[in-house]
Amino acid sequence: MIEPRLNLPEDPDRIAGQMVLCGFAGKTLPDEVRRALAEGRLAGVVLFARNLGGPDEVRALTGSIRAASELPPLVAVDQEGGRVSRLQPPFTQWPSMRALGRRDDPALAREIAAAVADELLAVGINLNFAPVLDVDSNPSNPVIGDRSLGPKPERVTALGAAMIEGFLSAGLLCCAKHFPGHGDTGADSHQELPTVTADRATISRRELPPFAAAIAAGVPVVMAAHVKFTALDHYYPASISPRILDGLLREELGFRGVIVTDDLEMGALMKNMPLTDAAFAAARAGADLLLVCSGPAPAEAARRALKDAMRMGALSEGRSLLSVQRALALKERFTSRPAAADPRVIGCVRHQELAERVRGG
């Protein structure tokens, strides 16, 4: 891990804040989010379609986020392609990952990812929660489907690694998701807790190779799934499982980057525990960043839960500081540089032609 030159926060208030990413409503920055960023009580924000208009609007919003922030902020989005595309025209409308997978062309996947990165960087977004590395192994899966690069682990592995190389070559932070896999589920974790009953040998053969290749390719962020794998941890879903985050991801696969949770307010967790308990459990399990997407009040509740757990000794302040150190090192590498992408790349002819190459494959 690269040691950050940015000053580390020293009090539990700000340590806890630098472990939370917040969502909010509207196309302008709410005052409470602005204050939290200014006081170091948020690591950054996650943006959705509700926040995003045309390029000028998005640039104005991300500029206000950066201007408000005491430390360089993460500005994240899900721009996977296909049905999970937060940015609408004139931004290029990229085809689904399934369509890209059918082309089975790593060079094309790398080129697509770099083009996506250029458009995001042009409007001040520095983290894309992509690529999806779930293997589409269950036809009844209600949430992954065409978000996956396909049903063959070797294809997902090769194309996913190529996409990571493309994102990083353009200077964009990217994220491998949803670890250790959401492809073999019959339930949507937005609504309820899915359970995968595959044995460890199957998981090692099918789910894990794309993530191992992503780590080898230098992926800086991995998103933990709200999915229970009975062969890995009989009690806890991955996002709050020390066995899966610390044991499997860190120790066995050797990941040294930042672990982010999927949205803590999803039904998979919220139907089983309060948000504050979920925040504590995820941090204790090894998550570095907690995603709280609905608004600043729940994000503040999660932050307070971490702060209180540190003050009571239930959550190691030193371990939490290590999480913040990982995130700050990441920010220093990627967010301190000015956006290199020319705004004219947005929806440009070359990008439209790239998208059509995939659709026509």
Image (cartoon, grey):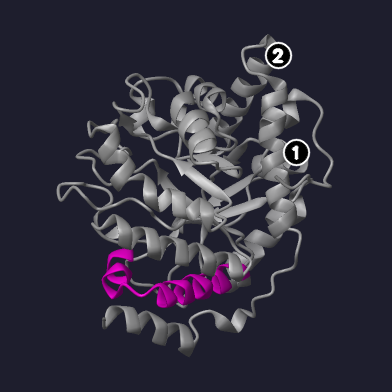
Residue 53 belongs to the span the image colors magenta: no
Query: In the image, 207: left or right of 240?
Result: left
Span colored in magenta: 97-121
Q: Which residue is mark 2?
A: 311
Residues packed near mark 1 inside 10 Å, few (<14), some (14 to 19) or many (20 plus): many
Residue 118 belongs to the span the image colors magenta: yes
State the residue in front, 197 or 336: 197
Query: In the image, 203: left or right of 275?
Result: left
**Helix, strand, or loop for circle 1?**
loop
Q: Is residue 354 above or below residue 169?
A: below
Look at 82% across and 46% down and name the residue there: 6
Give the main secondary structure, helix, strand or loop, of the magenta stretch.
helix
Task: Give the amino acid at mark 2.
Answer: Arg
Q: Which residue is mark 1?
A: 40
Quadrant containing the N terminus in the rendered view: top right
Look at 40% across and 31% down and name the residue there: 238
Q: Are marks 2 and 1 in contact (CB under 8 Å)?
A: no
Can you tell which quarter of the image residue 197 is in? top left
